[in-house]
Image (tube, grey):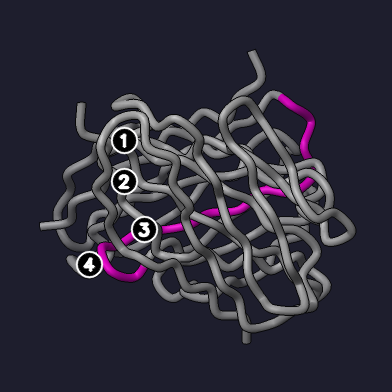
């Protein structure tokens, strides 16, 4: 089944403890992106990647890192999480957003205390 | 900078009613417009994708239109059912070298049996 898989689905952590949220797609998509969703603010792009080793900042990149060493994986790294990073995170992929739109993962609900 | 607005923020209708959800955008240089459905705490499911060269797309009881000149898209749902209850989001993809995508905050739809 073609899908975008995120792990974990739920995560509670403490301030400052490094964490990684994984994202993997099995559709050979070149484009991948991370979003966070907050009430009243909608989805905001954190980082995106056009291909392996090609990443760039979205609208809200502060406090996040990403890497794209393999085409299928695009992990989101929080080096020192803070409470304002408590949010619902989504990974998405596309063969090319211009023509094909996006496929989203099921989301990761992160709580930083 | 693209801005996407969805009005109303919430809508409640009786089962069987036909309804229209609205999406407006400020930048007409749009590659495509995608409509998603999101169930509470879940990921986004793509419903329809309209390319900039198209005027509308249909899938079952859903019909989405795109009018670039007026900066508007509509999602028409025929014969609404309680299972249609969800939040509906639109997202516009613009040029910019990296396929910038801007989401609306969504319209929360409740279909009452």
**Rendering coords of residue B59 (x, y %):** 66, 30
Disc 1 and disc 4 in contact, CB within 8 angstroms: no
Could you tell me how far apart the alpha carbons at marks 4 and 3 are, in whole angstroms? Answer: 16 Å
Q: Which mark is residue B85?
A: 1
Q: Are marks 2 and 1 in contact (CB under 8 Å)?
A: yes
Which residue position holds label 2? B109
Q: Which chain contains the residue that carries disc 1?
A: B
The kind of secondary structure element at disc 4 is: loop
Does the segment drawn in magenta span residue B3?
Answer: no
Q: Quadrant of residue B42?
A: top left
Mark 3–mark 2 Cα distance, whole angstroms, equals 18 Å
Residue neighbourhood size for the residue with mark 4, other residues' Cα within 10 Å, grouped as few (<14), some (14–19), many (≥20): some
Q: CA distance from mark 4 to mark 2?
A: 33 Å
Q: Residues within 10 Å of mark 2 (few under 14, many from 20)?
A: many
Q: Name the image quarter holding the C terminus of chain B.
A: top left
Q: Are marks 4 and 3 in contact (CB under 8 Å)?
A: no
Residue at the disc numbered 4: A82
The residues bearing labels 1 and 3 have C-alpha atoms spaced at a distance of 20 Å
> What residue sits 84% from the left and 49% below the top?
A99
- The x and y percentages for residue A62 are 43, 76
Dot 2 falls on a residue whose secondary structure is strand
């Amino acid at each position: 089944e073609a899908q975008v898989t995120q792990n974990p689905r739920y995560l509670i952590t403490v301030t400052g403890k490094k964490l990684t949220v994984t994202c993997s797609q099995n559709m050979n998509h070149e484009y991948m992106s991370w979003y966070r969703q907050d009430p009243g603010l909608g989805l905001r792009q954190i980082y995106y990647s056009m291909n392996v080793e090609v990443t760039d900042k979205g609208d809200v990149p502060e406090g996040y890192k990403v890497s794209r060493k393999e085409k299928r994986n695009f992990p989101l790294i929080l080096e020192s999480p803070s409470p304002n990073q408590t949010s619902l995170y989504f990974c998405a992929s596309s063969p090319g957003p211009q023509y094909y739109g996006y496929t989203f993962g099921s989301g990761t609900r992160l709580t930083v205390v | 900078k693209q801005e996407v607005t969805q009005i109303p923020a919430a809508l409640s209708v009786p089962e069987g009613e036909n309804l229209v959800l609205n999406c407006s955008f400020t930048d007409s240089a749009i590659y495509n417009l995608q409509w998603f459905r999101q169930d509470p705490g879940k990921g986004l499911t793509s419903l329809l994708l309209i390319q900039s060269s198209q005027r509308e797309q249909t899938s079952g009881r859903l019909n989405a239109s795109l009018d670039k000149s007026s900066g508007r898209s509509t999602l028409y749902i025929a014969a609404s059912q309680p299972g249609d209850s969800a939040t509906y989001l639109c997202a516009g993809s613009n040029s910019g070298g990296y396929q910038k995508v801007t989401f609306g905050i969504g319209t929360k739809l409740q279909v009452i049996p």
